[in-house]
Image (spheres, rainbow, N blue to C red):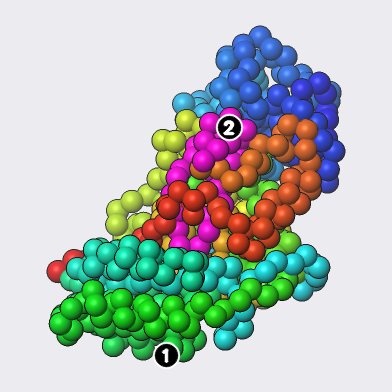
Amino acid sequence: MSDDASGCATLSDADKTTPVMVRYVRVHSTDHVAIAVEPLSAGEVLSFGDLSVTLTTDIPKGHKIALYDIAPGQEVLKFGFVIGRAIAPIKAGEHIHTHNLATALSGVEDYAYAPEAAEGPGSHPDARTFMGYRRADGRVGIRNEIWILCTVGCVARTSERLAKVASERFKGRVDGVYALTHPLGCSQLGDDLNHTRKLLAALASHPNAGGVLIVGLGCENNQLSALLGEIQGRSPDRLKYFAAQMVDDEHEAGLEALEELVAVVEKDERELCHVSDLAIGVKCGGSDGFSGLTANPLVGRVADTVAQAGGMSIMTEIPEVFGAERILMARAKDETVFHEIVDVVNDFKQYFLDNNQPVFENPSPGNKAGGITTLEEKSLGAVQKGGLSQLTQVLRYGERATERGLSLLEAPGNDAVSSTALTAAGAVIVLFTTGRGTPLGFPAPTLKIASNTALAEKKPHWIDFNAGQALEGKTLDETADDLMALILRVASGEQSNNEKNEEREIAIWKNGVTL
């Protein structure tokens, strides 16, 4: 970050190291807009080197200010990229938002392979360590829990009762016993049923679970035998199961199975592991005008650290790369991965169109209140969570990451669905950036990273880390080091706020008919 004039800063790639207190920010030297870091009043003069702009209206915190006169139909740049087109004349110093700016997105597009150099996995080894659980399949977990998964919603409450009793009975012997329940598994067909089965099977092999109990009913579409056939890398002594209709007392059967699992899992011990052993998921929810300035680029630096050390960084939310997908395509490992990115992006656009929905029906009301106007703007901020590393793998929904480096995972933007998918893909910790705040948590420890200090101070019981420091005197480099230190502490056993608050759930992407 470099100081252009009193109260102003730019955030170009070349100047992110010098701390400076700012009141307004121009992200890139080619941008037509600046962003208010705090509320600004009409009549104030903003200075950007040789450029001075007088505000014609009050500007809310996080919102955009026109730096030049912009004609209707003209493209508007932020982050150095197009975020939409003007739909009305805009004067320099005017507030830019939904009343005068609209998306330029349409539908499915054609893309050309135009690779750019990017750092790959293992290019920057990292000597930092944590204490984790090395599993038989070579992956490393950061918790030693027992998870109870249900094949169908009919036995969800049964699973929860088992977890409640087991948590007390086996307290202190494992890191916890948790039921991850859902309402699906019956009255599903085809790809919709396969989605549910693949997702549950991937969760059942997660390295944060030392043992897994699967509770079935018996008559559901998601048959226990079919689900068991999908589970990989879980030895029989760490995977127990039964169908409630087939036993006399499902509670007795469940507790007996859990006792057997605990006897095995409690022997696991933490051992020294390296950054290259980490698999992290990156996610944003309730974004605001600061998310693309602080929290997302901060998480992107951590994603680069992990990916370039030889670990795994996984990003998702495909609808929230629309308008910024070419940035990711340019960093594809090879032409095969490029075409896989094209397919997953266009398939998701077609999914919208098949359901008679425009591909740009985003941002949310909360995003707009925080200063985000168009999907392009939201996406350009969101993709920064993936950093600048080479993109090595594209995963379809329910698939596990197998390639080191940065992966792109097919899932919608919905917080619960996408965070569950990240966990199923193998993320042992989820870095969740937010400008508005949410208490939600998921099976993997979920670190909430606030884009602004006001949120961090208002919701300290939700927020684990304040990225707003990057606009208040700390550099992004320093802030990224602090966040990485927190990640390694949590990986070694320190609890995240979602764990302390017992906020833990899963959600499965349903996209088919219900019988």
Is residue 299 shown left or right of residue 364? right
Residue 286 belongs to the span the image colors magenta: no
Classify 10 Å Cα crowding around label 1: few (below 14), some (14-19), many (20 and above).
few
- On screen, 414 above or below 443? above
Q: Nearer the viewer, residue 5 or 424?
A: 424
In magenta, the rendered stretch is: 433-461
Q: Earlier in the sequence, mark 1 or mark 2?
A: 1
- On screen, 227 above or below 507? below
Is residue 14 shown left or right of residue 245? right
Task: State the separation of the CA atoms marked 1 and 2.
Answer: 47 Å
Mark yes or no: residue 381 visible. Answer: no
Give the residue at x 60% y 57%.
Answer: 494
Q: Position of residue 222 (x, y in %)?
A: 25, 78
Give the residue at x 46% y 43%.
Answer: 438
Q: Secondary structure at mark 1?
A: helix
Residue underneath mark 1: 236
